[in-house]
Image (cartoon, coloured by chain):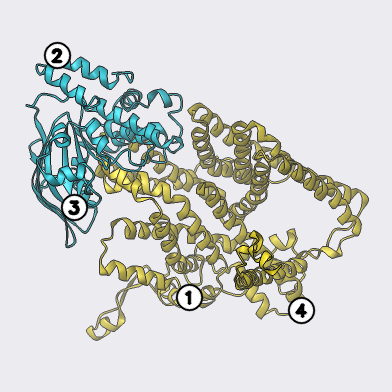
Chain colours: A cyan, B yellow
Amino acid sequence: MTTEDTTTETVAEESSNDPTNDDMLIQTDVSESVSASGTESTRTIVESRNVNVWYDDDQALQDISMEIPENQVTAMIGPSGCGKSTFLRCINRMNDLIDAARVEGELYLGGKNVYDADVDPVALRRRVGMVFQKPNPFPKSIRENVLYGLKVQGIEVDEDEIVEQSLRRAALWDEVKDRLDESGLELSGGQQQRLCIARAIAPDPEVLLMDEPASALDPIATSQIEDLIDDLAEQYTVVIVTHNMQQAARISDKTAVFLTGGELVEFDDTQKIFENPESDRVEDYITGKFG
Amino acid sequence: MATDTRTTVSEGFGEVSRTVGTAFRYLLLAATLVGILAVGVLFVYVGNDAIQPLTADPGWHLTFFLTLVVPTLAVGGVLRARADGSFRVGLESLGLLAVMPLFAGGVATLFLSVLPALVTFSYAVALGLVVATVVALMRSRRVGFGAKLLVVGVATVVSLLFVPGIIQSLPFVPVEWLLVALTLGTPVAAIAGAYATSSWNDRRTGRIAGAAALGGVVAAGLLGSLIGFGGTAATILAAVAGVPVALYAATALDRHPARRDGLLLPLTVVGGMLLGAFLVRTVGFAGPAAWLDWAFLTGPNSITAEDAGIYPALVGSILLMLIVALLSFPVGIGAAVYLEEYAPDSRLAQLIEVNIANLAGVPSVVYGLLGLGLLARMLDEGLPILPAAIADPLGLEPVRVGANLFGIGTVFVGGMTLSLLILPIVIISSQEAIRSVPPSQRQASYGMGATRWQTIRNVVLPKAFPGILTGTILALGRAIGETAPLLVIGAPNQFGLPQELSSRVGAMPLQIYAWATTSGTPEFYAKVIPAGVVVLLVAMLAMNSVAIVLRNRFQS
């Protein structure tokens, strides 16, 4: 696919083939940038059952149970310290790197509990890409950055092809194609974050986790990243943590609202969450009365 | 009137007293200057005694002032005023030109005095075969790690056991300088090629640079042996000093063509020195009666001040530093990586870290005792597998193995003792360098599904390496000046050139100490000791300059 594809085109294209055509049109009318969600019957790829997380004696997550659908964008919102990033890091077991963290419960990725004793966290992370809050490219060339995952996984591929394909998907190719051997650190902040996204998708992961990927960027870079997430959702399951409620409303299909204490208060279609939430606390949070 | 002035703006804010702050500031300045001035005065004093510049003809000074100082200042001033980076290029190339020949001299002493060219060459070939095996195996992905390790192990043993013998028994061997050129030139060419490949991003350029480096080294050797400079010396000079300087100049020229005028600075200095020397010789002005001259540098020690030279001590110091570097770097960096990356945050790890910090403060004479008791005795008498205390009551013979492996009071024991001495410093500075790698980089690597080992190798070590190297080189600078441990392990006061690892040798600080105590005539105090101190300081500063360059280059 090319980078010229815009969100609206994608929406129109998919809507025309969609049985729920009218719903889709209404949805785009209400909130133009909400991307085309698939049908209701999408498969669940990540499922958590009663996940609890403690940092030493502090409980960071309480009994989180949710089902994240495949090839959609799922947003997690909530005030600082509510555990949304912690939950994200449970999915690829990055919490294992913190000595103090303890995880209980079951978290299934593609039907397999990732906290089973026979799961190698390194092998798990090879199937789950991750993008962090602050752009963190390696002090290596752009090409080496993109190929890092393939290198550590020992996958032999046509390197030039993968580099071009990943950078195109991350909407960065046109800006860097003539300087692939320059250091990734010489790019601007927004470009660095797109490079990190290209790096994360180069090994073709099943799920892409994003931990506030645009919070350190300016508005223009942010909107580029948002457009990109929209495009990525066609091929990947994207789980994104964000502070920015407008951002969640714009780009996600499903939204999970975490509130203080590590509690998942509501998880539903984004549209429903923002227009007619079940819980008063969620409504208060979304309308700015709390949080 | 009074009420008017009070309401004006200029007096409306009043004044805040800064007296205490100002006093504090100048006290701090004084504290800074005390140390620097004291050392500066010492340097001037010692340098004056060693070089004795005032004994030269005024004409000599004037000639060099006109040919060297004035043009250098003029060129430097112009370059600096242009502010386009060419001044920096000039300074860097001048620094390279000043320091690299010193390193070449150090390497040359080893090849000329200690290592027989053929033996060195044969072992270099054996090691080269091992390296070639490793490189060949690294390319293939089908062979498992265990199999690779086995092959490399077997290759190392076979190669080191048989190859040197075969080469040394060859009926025809090349002349000495050619052997040295191959021994030294091949790795230098490989490094030059790799550097050129990475800085021009082009394998062909890299290969050309490597070939040019090897060709240049061989050509220098041939030229040197033809004009009587000495083939081996010319080879080493070209390999250690010529290739890096040429590579730097080529990179500077190609990368920033606008800054190429910076290279005028070293040219001016070298040209000025040559012109000055030529003029002084033609006119017949007498130079300074320096004590620190070629004869002092390359002469053996003597009981008379006139004949005393520092060469054996210089070679001893270089050998010691070589062994200290080879022993302490891998062990120290390995320990630092383990403590930072692998060790769990347990009481034991904390205890170890606190103890390492304490060991860094243990007086060096204590390490000398350790070297004497543990290393020298044990290596002399052998490791007590069955000590006499247990064997005698049982009516058995005591069993010791490896007796007299390296002898006592030696290069090897001294090197090991000094390695132990600087090990805590190496560990601590390496730990700090590793700790300064941002956690976000590690997270990124782990997030991509890298193992701990892959993260350390690909992310942590490359980023921490300049810092590690800086710290370890500075630690090496401490080791070169240590006297007490060497005295305790029984290094002799009078010594000749070291011949092998078990030779009884000294080092420069020990030699200076010996001059000051046993031959303490006024003549020694006034001239020989200052000259020795200058040589020691120059050697130390040359080593530290590498650390400084590394820090400046990688900090930005």
Of labels 1 and 4, earlier in sequence is 1
Between the residue at mark 4 and the residue at mark 2, the CA separation in whole angstroms equals: 103 Å
The label nearer to you, 3 versus 2, is 3
Numbered label tally: 4
* Chain letter for the residue marked with disc 4 in the picture: B
For the point 32% across and 58% down, the residue is B338
Q: Which mark is residue B288?
A: none
The label nearer to you, 3 versus 1, is 3
Between the residue at mark 1 and the residue at mark 4, the CA separation in whole angstroms equals: 30 Å
For the point 26% across and 35% down, the residue is A246
Using the image as rendered, state which of residue B439 and residue B337 is in the foreground.
B439
Q: Which mark is residue B522?
A: 4
The percent position of residue B101, horizontal first and vertical second, equals 65, 50
The percent position of residue A242, horizontal first and vertical second, equals 26, 41
Kind of residue at badge 2 = Asn
Residue that label 1 marks: B368
The reply to whether label 3 and label 4 mark residues of one chain is no
The reply to whether label 1 and label 2 mark residues of one chain is no
Residue A144: quarter of image: top left
From where the camera sits, is residue B495 visible?
A: no
**Residue extending furthest toward the top:** A16
Between the residue at mark 3 and the residue at mark 4, the CA separation in whole angstroms equals: 82 Å
Between the residue at mark 3 and the residue at mark 1, the CA separation in whole angstroms equals: 61 Å
- Label 2 element class: helix
Kind of residue at badge 3 = Thr
Using the image as rendered, state which of residue A4 and residue B273 is in the foreground.
A4
Between the residue at mark 3 and the residue at mark 2, the CA separation in whole angstroms equals: 41 Å
* Chain letter for the residue marked with disc 1 in the picture: B
For residue B278, side relative to residue B228 (left or right): right
